Image (spheres, helix red, strand yellow):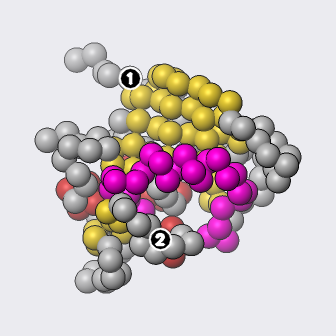
């Protein structure tokens, strides 16, 4: 069965996504959008991303946490010890969201069907980056300007890409 795997991420102009296991900005509308899209679905993340969350596990979602420590258990989460095992534990019908971090994004990018990108129009100093997206593999299907508030000094947009089907 082909599972629906979607990556959801906020990315700076320089592909920065985080520093010191924290987000680089706070965009209230983007966080609300994240909650709306992921609620009721499965979310997949690495252990560091899990521990960076303000509420753990995220409510009204199946939280799949990937760790490389065999037998490690985090209460309230579904544990996976490889990318393949995480995929096997994803929902067979509904959309599954890959929520980070950098290593998890890099490993899931080749198998993801859809990308939900919040593109921030500013460079940030960071220690975690999102991999480059090959424009020959992805088609932009939706683009919408985000609504900034007084707390941020940059513009942003919501982009949705779908993987281009390969002709066999």
Query: Is 21 in the magenta?
Result: yes
Q: Would residue 39 be found to the left or right of residue 18 on screen?
A: left
Near-viewer residue (150 or 138): 150
Circle 1: element type? loop
Q: Is residue 144 above or below residue 47?
A: above
Query: Is 63 in the magenta?
Result: no
Displayed quadrant of residue 113? top left
Residue that numbered label 1 is attached to? 164
For the point 77% across and 57% down, the residue is: 125
In the rendered view of the protein, which quadrant contains the C terminus? Answer: top left
Badge 1: how crowded within 10 Å, few (<14), some, or many (20+)?
Answer: some
Q: Would residue 150 be found to the left or right of residue 142 on screen?
A: right
Residue 150 image point, x, y percent? 85, 49
In the rendered view of the protein, which quadrant contains the N terminus? Answer: top left
Residue 44 image point, x, y percent? 38, 59
Q: What separation in Å lies between label 2 and label 1 (alpha carbons)?
A: 30 Å
């Amino acid at each position: 069965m082909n599972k629906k795997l979607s990556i959801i991420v906020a990315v700076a102009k320089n592909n920065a996504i985080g520093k010191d296991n924290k987000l680089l900005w706070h965009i209230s509308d983007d966080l609300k959008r994240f909650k709306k899209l992921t609620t009721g679905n499965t979310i997949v993340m690495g252990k560091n991303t899990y521990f960076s969350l303000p509420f753990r596990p995220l409510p009204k979602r199946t939280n799949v946490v990937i760790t490389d420590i065999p037998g490690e258990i985090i209460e309230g989460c579904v544990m996976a010890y490889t990318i393949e095992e995480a995929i096997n534990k994803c929902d067979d019908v509904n959309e599954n969201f890959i929520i980070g971090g950098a290593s998890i994004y890099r490993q899931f990018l080749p198998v993801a069907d859809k990308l939900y990108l919040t593109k921030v129009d500013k460079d940030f100093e960071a220690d975690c980056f999102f991999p480059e997206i090959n424009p020959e593999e992805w088609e932009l299907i939706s683009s919408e300007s985000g609504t900034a508030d007084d707390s941020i000094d940059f513009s942003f947009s919501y982009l949705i890409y779908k993987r281009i089907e390969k002709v066999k």
